[in-house]
Image: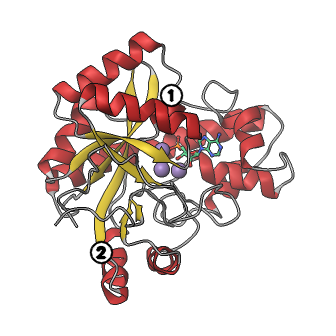
Amino acid sequence: MSTSPSLNVDLHCHSTVSDGVLAPRELAARAHANGVGLWALTDHDEVSGLAPAAQAAHDLGLPFVPGIEISVTWAQQTVHVVGLGIDAANPVLKAGVADIQAGRVGRAREMADRLQGLGIADSYAGALRFVGNPNLISRTHFARFLVEQGHSKNMQAVFDKYLGDGKPACVPGSWATLAQALGWISAAGGRAIIAHPGRYHYTPVQFGALFDEFKDMGGAGIEVVTGSHSVDQYRQYADVARQYGFMASCGSDFHSPSESNKDLGSLPPLPADLKPVWHDWV
Ligand code: AMP
Ligand code: MN
Ligand code: MN
Ligand code: MN
C-alpha cells in the first residue's frame, strides 16, 4: 500500500522502562487519543517495554512498530541511533543492550559524586526514586531529582548548568560503537535511523563523515521531523536525506506531558518528496 499523506506517524518516544514518565500502555492510549495512526516505542537501550506496548496498541487497533534508541559514541560525542521494526527477542540485540546497561550504574555513581562535590547530596538515591527500571538510570532521572529539590527551575536549566554534555556533573557513558549499533539492529531485522541529527555538535566535515559511514554500514535513514528540530532544521535535514539517499523518519521524542515540548502525534508531516522509513509498512 502507498502511504496516505494524512497518516499521523510518530516513531520516537520513551516509557518508564527508560526515561519517560508514562508506562508503555499509557503511551499507546495517548498516541491513539492524539490521532497517531502508526506508532513506535523507542526506549533508550531497552526492549522490555515493547511487549506491553504491542499488546496495548493491538487492543486499540493502533498499528505498532517495535523500536529502540541505542546510545552510541562517535567522534567523542553521543549519537542516538533509532532501530525500527526490530525483533525484541533477538539475542544479539539483547546482549548488546545488556552491555550498555551494565555501564550505566557506575556512571550514575560517578555523576552523584560530582554533584556531591557541587554541594548536592544524596542524588544517587534521589535519582533512583524517579527510575522505573533499575537497569536504566539516566541523566534524565538525576535532572528530575534536581528540579524537585529546587536546584534548577526546569529540566533544560539542569542540563545547562550540571548535566549537559561537557557540564561539570556529566560523565560520558560507555556506549556502543556505530558499527555495533548497526550490527545489532540489522541482526534484529530492523532499520537504523540517526535520531535528531540537529542536536549534535559536530563540524560540517564531521557530519559528512558520520553520514557517509552510517550509509556505508547499511544505515537506512535519518529523523527529519522530530521534537528536537526547529522548522529550519526540518528543511536542513530534508536536504541531507535527499543528498545521501536516506529514508526519512518522524517522531516527537515524547518523554513526559510536563517536560516535552512536543506531544505524541503533534508533528507536521514529512516533506512529500522524501521516502518515509515506513513506506512499505503501512
Ligand atoms: P543519558 O542516556 O543518561 O546520557 O541521558 C540522556 C537523556 O537526557 C536524553 O535522552 C534526554 O532525554 C535527556 N536530555 C539530554 N539533554 C537534555 C536537555 N538539554 N534537556 C532536557 N533533557 C535532556
Ligand atoms: Mn531520553
Ligand atoms: Mn535521543
Ligand atoms: Mn529519544
- The reply, left or right, for residue 217 in relation to residue 237 is left
Ligand 1 picture quarter: top right
Q: Residues within 10 Å of mark 2 (few under 14, many from 20)?
A: some
* Disc 1 target residue: 200
What's the residue type where badge 2 is placed? Answer: Pro
Q: Which of marks 2 and 1 is nearer the N terminus?
A: 2
Q: Quadrant of the N terminus?
A: bottom left
Rendered view: 165 above or below 55: above
Query: Which residue: 64% across, 57% down?
Result: 260
What's the residue type where badge 1 is placed? Answer: Tyr
How far, Cα to Cα, is label 2 from label 1?
31 Å
Quarter of image, res 129: bottom right
* Disc 2 target residue: 63
Rendered view: 257 above or below 225: below
Query: Which residue: 53% across, 22% down?
Result: 201
| Numbered circle sitting on residue 36 | none
Instruction: Name the one closer to the observer, 10 or 146.
Output: 10
Residue 177 visible from this viewpoint:
no
- The reply, left or right, for residue 84 in relation to residue 149 is left
